[in-house]
Image (spheres, grey):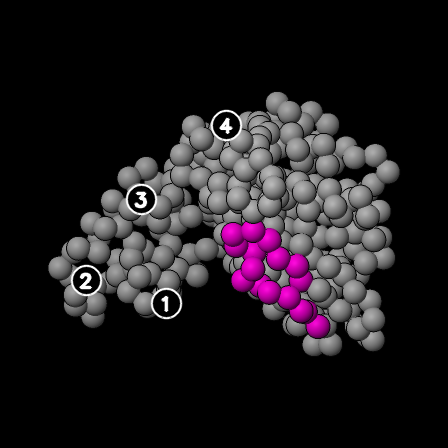
Amino acid sequence: MGSNNHACYAPFGAARPSYKRGVQGYTNFDSKPLLEFLTQLYETNTTLVIIGDSTSRQKLQALECELLREDKRVKVRGHLWGTLPCNTTLKVYLPPDKQRLTVIQSISMGPNSATCLKGGKGASAPASGAFENAQFIVDQLTASNRSVFIVANIGLWYNDLDLFNEVVPPVLQWLLEVARQPHRSNVVTWHETFSQHWINPTGSGYFSKGYADLQERQPAFKLPHLVDAFDYQVPTCCRHVTNTSYLADWRNDVIHTHLHKMDRNGLISVLPMAAITR
């Protein structure tokens, strides 16, 4: 939604071919991929850990919604809004008898997380404390004879390329250590930062406050019925990404560059969310 409180009109959805895509084997209403996944985690004594930026909350909401679509007998208990600024826990009671319990941890990882761990090093910890609290929680889980399935991302917390370049290597090094942990069946994935579709001078889709402010100041916006729906969005709901050159989408390009250098064995798989949402 734009700041004018109007929803995104067509043809925005129609212009996003990714919305029409299905997942092979899970394109019919009867499929239950998420329920099957969480059941497998329960059976293998594994905890799903979602680590990342402010979109973690939306992921939890979508997760609960999809679980209820798949089976209304699922019960989810926890504090969805508690992800920020630190962490929260969701308990998922699986059907048919709700006696099987699997836990989902959602942990914020970024500059605002440096104060989350009481008694920790804070900003003096590696990556300025971005993952100190996440590391503590994951260590507690693996020390209790559990494996972890991590989905990690930090992109939207950072708006400065140089700072992001400093933070990423220690974050990835820690995740690689989790993936290599002996006597555990840990899985670590990196969730690409979603593509953005703001109007900006480079065509990358990244938010540009200057362009957004300029558009909102246009006199025509006081008479929305005279403005084309595409242009009325503030600062437009869905402009096409026209610039895919290296570092146009630097939040993802930096990650891929460092992973190529640090993870020669492919221990961290990448979820291609940028392409899916482009």
Q: Is mark 3 on a helix, strand or loop?
A: loop
Q: Residues within 10 Å of mark 4 (few under 14, many from 20)?
A: few
Q: Toward the viewer: 65 or 137?
A: 137
Instruction: Indicate whether 214 appears above or below 242.
Output: below
Q: Are marks 4 and 1 in contact (CB under 8 Å)?
A: no
Name the image quarter holding residue 31: bottom right
Instruction: Classify residue 225 as left or right of residue 33.
Output: left
> Which residue is depicted at the point 21% across and 67% down?
224
Q: Name the residue under label 3.
A: 208
Q: Name the residue under label 1.
A: 7
- For marks 4 and 1, the one nearer the N-term is 1
> Which residue is depicted at the point 77% across and 33% down?
180
Q: Mark 4 points at which residue?
A: 166
- For marks 3 and 2, the one nearer the N-term is 3
Q: Position of residue 141 (x, y in %)?
A: 76, 48
**Residue type at the position of mark 1:** Ala
Q: What element carries label 1?
A: loop
Magenta stretch encompasses residue 85: yes
